[in-house]
Image (cartoon, coloured by chain):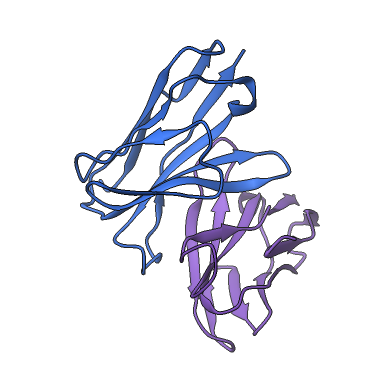
Amino acid sequence: EAQVTQNPRYLITVTGKKLTVTCSQNMNHEYMSWYRQDPGLGLRQIYYSMNVEVTDKGDVPEGYKVSRKEKRNFPLILESPSPNQTSLYFCASSLDKSTYNEQFFGPGTRLTVL
Amino acid sequence: EDQVTQSPEALRLQEGESSSLNCSYTVSGLRGLFWYRQDPGKGPEFLFTLYSAGEEKEKERLKATLTKKESFLHITAPKPEDSATYLCAVQEIYGGSQGNLIFGKGTKLSVKP
């Protein structure tokens, strides 16, 4: 089954404690992306990757890091989380950046930073 | 200034009561406009892609249309299972977004039996 998986699905942590949210896709997609979704603000892109070892900032990259060492995985790293990073996070992938017809989203990770 | 604006923010319909959702956009050049459905606590699910003015796409009770400045998602005789938040996103050819998706804030649709 074609899918994007994220782990963990729910996470409560404290300010300053480094964390990683994993994202994996099994569709051999080149393009992967991270979004955060907040009430009243909609989905905003954090980082994206057009292929292995190629990453770039989206609209709200501050406080986040990413890496793309393998095609299937695109982890999101918060090195020193703060309460304003409390949000619902989605990973997404598509065949490539020029074609969004089959953009698949993961189930989401709800993060609370105390 | 928002580049993608969806209206209304929320819409409550009776089962069978047809209506339309609006998505207006202000980008310099449109590569594509996308509609997604999002159920509570889940990731968005792709519905349609529209590329040029005049284009229409249909799926069951949903029909998406596109003009040069806006798109409509028409819902014909909706059922309670159509209740969800509908998201619109655009991909622009030029500009600061570098071809990434720009999402609207969504329209929350509730269909009562």
Q: Is residue A38 left or right of residue A40?
A: left
State the residue at coordinates (40%, 57%).
Answer: A103
The x, y position of residue B78, in whole percent, is 68, 61
State the residue at coordinates (34%, 33%).
Answer: A75
The x, y position of residue B15, in whole percent, is 74, 57
State the residue at coordinates (21%, 39%).
Answer: A69
Residue A81, placed above or below residue B49: above
Residue A81, placed above or below residue B112: above
Q: Nearer the viewer, residue A3 or B1?
A: B1
Q: Which picture quadrant has residue A25?
A: top left
Q: Is residue A68 left or right of residue B94?
A: left
The x, y position of residue A35, in whole percent, is 50, 43
Count up the numbered dots: 0
Chain A, hue in figure: blue
The x, y position of residue B26, in whole percent, is 68, 73
Residue B17, placed above or below residue A51: below
Q: Nearer the viewer, residue B73 or B12?
A: B73
Chain B, hue in figure: purple
Q: Nearer the viewer, residue B99 or B110?
A: B99
Q: Is residue A75 left or right of residue A53?
A: right
Residue A66, placed above or below residue B52: above
Residue positioned most to the bottom: B54
